[in-house]
Amino acid sequence: MSAALRWLPQGTVYGALLNFRREWDLWAPQMTEAPYKAAPQAPVLYIKTANTFAPCGAAIAVPDEVDVGVTLGLVIGGFEEKLPPALAESAQAATKKEAGGLHRIAGCVLLNDLSRPHASYYRPPIKFRNRDGFLGCGPVLQAVPDLSTLALELRINGTLAQRIELSTLVRDAATLLRDVSEFTTLQAGDVLMLGTDCLPDGTRPRAKSGDRIEIRAPGFAPLVHTLIEERAT
Amino acid sequence: MKRARIAWAGAVHDAIERDGRLELLTPGFKGRLLDFGDVVWLPPLGDMPPHRPRTVLALAINYADHAKELAFKPPEEPLAFAKGAASLIGHRAFTVRPDGVQNMHYECELAVVIGREARHVKRGDAYDFVRGYTVANDYAIRDYLENWYRPNLRVKNRDTCTPIGPWLVDAADVPNPMKLRLSTTVNGQVTQQGNTADMVFDVPTLIEYFSSFMTLYPGDLILTGTPDGVVDCPVGSHVVCEIEGIGALENTIIEETGRQRPSDKREQL
């Protein structure tokens, strides 16, 4: 597949922080402490800007060690697309009304939401998350499967580094869509990432230049890329 | 030159300011003059290429006086966040105030439009990468502030909450963007006054900072922060953010329920 044909986002890409129960639970004791002072109420979101988009197969330049953030992105569709049946059911449960008012979904993609490690979630993470190439994108848009049973697997240099169960989301896809839509109308082509899980100790899998990253899920074309050293300027 | 993007006669047009009117650039209507009140004003920005949605970067507490007002000490490096371009709306548009909120305030900001791909740009070269300037009103709803990636997107990424315009003024026509008076009026009363000279991080420094780790592309935006003097704007407020030599951006706050527009809109304008 030529690079030109590989999928890239067309619209704004939103990410959700603290959307896996494991990380939420690890953070819970300090959520009421300074500087946070209270647990987050609305989804904690961030944006991956266009300079971060890297097609499948790309060599992504990294300054030093990076956190690998395996996630699934829902791609918002136009008028012709419908909410997939599995999501529609869950959306109805979440909103207790017709799902027709919710966003239509064109499909989903595997994504690698890279970031430089940062211990504080107090200030916006631009310099950690918005470096060039820091969003590895799955090769093709795919139909949305049953997300409640979907597991994603991360391999670094062929070794299994993390297994992510989408059943452990704090806000499932439909709930996240609803809560984001409360203040921002997602547009056709926009991408809503469901969040990245941490390891049992609260860190994320680390990778460095020279590493080969492989993200797989049943029924999905794998997302593969390598990390290379950022050239000094 | 002052450039606008407008909707008129069922289509979107590029236009320039000509003696207090709009001159259309669309070939089929070339040279036609329209009054400011006869068009719908859109953000004065061009389309972005496929797979490159517009990056909108915004600064928090980038004026020393605003930092004092909000009880923060000025940051040691730019405190920046990203916004989705979908929150942008044009001049003379309506911004929705959610029901029940207590503090929704404007933020009059100099907006920088990038003109050339910028990566590892040095401060001294930064102005070469600027296409032009416009005025942004980066509304915030403080009721929704949370200390997680603060300012969080529920405060800063809302539909209708980032008016921008009316004009994109060519960089060549702004000899010193770091010495421009800013002011905001609410229903004709001056509530905010400042000068871009008081920015903590000036435009060249911001371009150097961002481009040190992220490539900026033509059409990307940097909203450079707001000075002292933000006040709550109830429904019906007519808010005008003006920057010397760049433009006066008008906006009216409307209520959420029913998304009604005020019946006295014409008089207010």
Image (cartoon, helix red, strand yellow):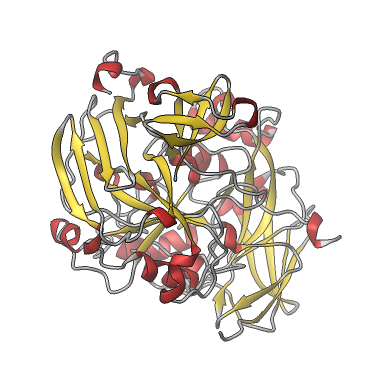
In x, y percent, where is residue A208? Answer: 61, 82
Horizontal side of B122 relative to A83 (left or right) equals: left
Horizontal side of B227 relative to B177 (left or right) equals: left
User: Looking at the image, which residue sits at the far right?
Assistant: A1
In the displayed structure, A63 sits above or below A19; it is below
Q: Quadrant of residue B81?
A: bottom left
Which sits in the foreground, B257 or B122? B122
Task: Name which residue lies at 61% across and 81% down.
Answer: A230
User: Looking at the image, which residue sits at the far top?
Assistant: B263
In x, y percent, where is residue A123? Answer: 35, 63
Horizontal side of B139 relative to B127 (left or right) equals: left
Work out which quarter of the rendered image holds the C terminus of chain B and state it: top left
Which sits in the foreground, A103 or B246? B246
In x, y percent, where is residue B96? Answer: 34, 30
In the displayed structure, A116 sits above or below A3; it is below
In the displayed structure, B181 sits above or below A84; it is below
Task: Name which residue lies at 26% across and 55% down.
Answer: B180
Q: Can residue A16 be seen in this view?
A: no
Task: Name which residue lies at 19% across and 57% down.
Answer: B66
Q: Can residue A86 be seen in this view?
A: yes
In the displayed structure, B154 sits above or below A30; it is above
Count the numbered circles shown.
Answer: 0
Task: Name which residue lies at 28% across and 60% down.
Answer: A36
In x, y percent, where is residue B1? Answer: 44, 46
